Image: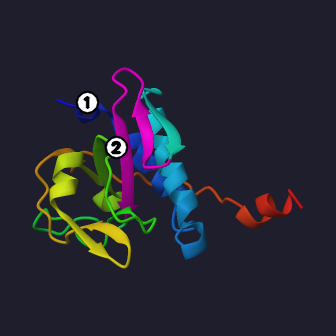
Amino acid sequence: MSFLKDVDYQPVVDCLVKLGGQLNKPSYRFLKGEVLALALEKATDGRLKYVDQEGYDSIDLETNTKYEFKSVADMFSPKNTITGRVSLQNTNKSTFNQSFDYLLCIQSAPHRFAIAQLTWDECNKNLETKSGQFNLKPGLPVVNWICKDSTVVNNLQPITLDVRKLLESIL
């Protein structure tokens, strides 16, 4: 059993509420993924260390288990299947090599926040290749929920990030 099932994800949802939609622009979505990965690190008291390595995002410091994250606002259907395109490798390689132990599929909409965990074997058995990318087949049923229906959306004051000012500060 994964230690991740015992984590309190409410602070992650609170972070997403404070962030609001300001990082939903296509050019900023990678920043939202960074914020989410850092929030998960904090929620696990640093055990799930965000390392941003090629092929995986975080590592469990106690077990050396490697985790890849994929997050979108609407990751799961009402029938508990993974929806949309989940790209596992998009570097135009001819083979899909194991670089992570588990994939965490994260639905980042605060009012429907959920995390499903898939093993590398589950991902490998449910691949489809399109234009040099390895993607999960759409409609894959979720078998292992890490977090679902256990958080609430608190009425929190949004925090404004001035990304433009941050980027201009280095010029």
Please indicate whether residue 75 sits to the left or right of residue 22 in the image.
left
Q: Which residue is drawn at 28% across and 65% down?
A: 75
Please indicate whether residue 143 sits to the left or right of residue 26 in the image.
left
Q: Which residue is drawn at 67% across and 59% down?
A: 161
Q: Quadrant of the C terminus?
A: bottom right
User: Mark 1 to mark 2: distance in Å?
Assistant: 21 Å
Quickly name the residue at label 1.
6
* Kind of residue at badge 2: Phe
* Kind of residue at badge 1: Asp
Specify start and end residues of the magenta stretch as a single range: 54-72
Question: Depth check: 54 or 168 in front?
Answer: 54
Colour mode of the rendering? rainbow
- Vertical arrangement, residue 48 with respect to residue 71, above or below: above
- Position in image of residue 80 (x %, y %): 13, 62
Q: Residue 89 falls in which quadrant of the image? A: bottom left
Residue 108: tell me if it is visible.
no
Circle 1 — which element?
helix
Nearer to us: label 1 or label 2:
2
Binning the other alpha carbons within 10 Å of mark 2 as few (below 14), some (14 to 19) or many (20 upward) gives: some
